[in-house]
Amino acid sequence: MTTTAPTKHRHVSEKANRFAESVIREMTREALRHGAVNLSQGFPDFPAPEEIKLAAAQAIHDDVNQYAITWGAKEFRDAIAEKTRWHLGLDVDPEREITVTCGSTEGMIAAMMACVDPGEEVVIFEPFYENYAPDAILSGATPRYVPLRPPDWSFDRDELRAAFGPRTKAVILCNPNNPTGKVFTRDEMEYVAGLCREFDALCFTDEIYEHIIYPRDDREVRHISMAQLEGMRERTVVVNSMSKTYSVTGWRVGYVLAPPHITGALRKVHDFLTVGAAAPLQRAGAFALRLPREYYERLQTDYLRRRDVLLPLLAEAGFRLFRPDGAYYVMTDIGAFGFKDDLEFTRHLIQEVGVACVPGSSFYSRPELGASQVRFCFCKKDETLAAAAERLAKLRRK
Ligand SMILES: Cc1ncc(COP(=O)(O)O)c(C=O)c1O
């Protein structure tokens, strides 16, 4: 496992030298190398929905094989607008407020490159989805990290306020959250929104897990988009994707909703970065986004079941769990096992026990903050979770 930045070569830019390769993606390669059950990278190992695959195959067969319009095929943008209307209650103009990108990954970096100037600050809640730190470096932004603290991953309002200032250009929100599974409450979001308005800051919100939410007995858990809050529509950039909702992470089709002036800038950046996302998959996307609402209900029930299979197994194996309310990950504390840190533990788990997870430090700005945590995902087949259970039974405390 190599988790340090490469040494500087004069052919390599300062920017590229300031971050390492993705640890999450590296864990998948490590899992393959050691034959470990892969509960690291968040992609389903079960088949994508049959009707969506057929729509993609049909699109290729129908010769939708050349460049789509750079900011997205009209039929797909129309479907995105329709879905945004019923799901979020927002009227988004497909001609001026939607950009189709190569996954939400491109959506986020393109949005940041379109909006942020070098030296401006971006507030990031940590632990964070690891892409946001390189996104900040590549767009020239200076990150200001604000902790989310377990067990419920809440933030301290004064700490958040102190991170905002005259140089703040934006805050990045990931809701439902990867890696913690936190679903921000309306109250928390109102507070973030208030700071954005007060400091004239944008909100880049990554909502790719919007449909993966788990009910709780003690309070309502609901996905609220930052764009739905009063006065936020004109300062919010919603990043979304087909990857998680339709179980097609390899398609690389995402989209961004943003007010027209931001969309204009974003479309230029997007055009010169990638020209556009795969045309036949956008046609299939238009089909997928018009699936009936039962599709989304089934998706939730299905992930709830998978969550409730994995969590007890981990608890039994000795992990302390931070129960997720959304997304398909669980952050855990590994203090009980007596390892030096999360890297040593992860190495042991992959190589000796045969289960891959992601070391917690990859979600923090400073490795020591995540040294006692690892993340598991549960977007996996029953057989995969059962195989993990069998292996985890071998895990011993030191
Ligand atoms: C929070 C978050 N954002 C973005 C991505 C990447 O999404 P995409 O496949 O749309 O690029 C992931 C993938 O795990 C994620 O967890």
Image: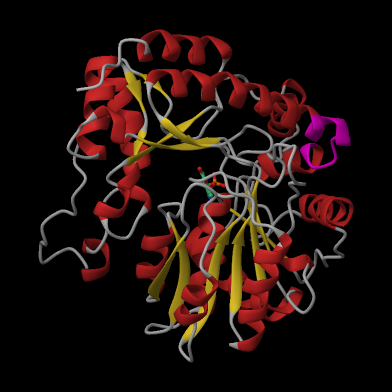
Residue 41 coordinates in the image, percent (x, y): 44, 34
- Residue 261, by quadrant, is bottom right
Vertical order, 313 against 299 (above or below) = above
Q: Is residue 123 above or below residue 387?
A: below
**Closest to the observer, 335 or 61:** 335
Where the C terminus falls, by quadrant?
top left
Relative to residue 37, is residue 290 depicted above or below?
Answer: below
> Magenta-highlighted stretch: main secondary structure?
helix
Picture residue at 30% right of the left edge, 30% below the top = 336
Residue positioned most to the bottom: 166
280 up-or-down from 123: above or below: above
Q: Is residue 160 left or right of residue 303?
A: left
Which range is magenta?
A: 288-297
Residue 294 in magenta stretch: yes
Q: Position of residue 317 (x, y in %)?
A: 39, 19
**Res 335 → quadrant:** top left
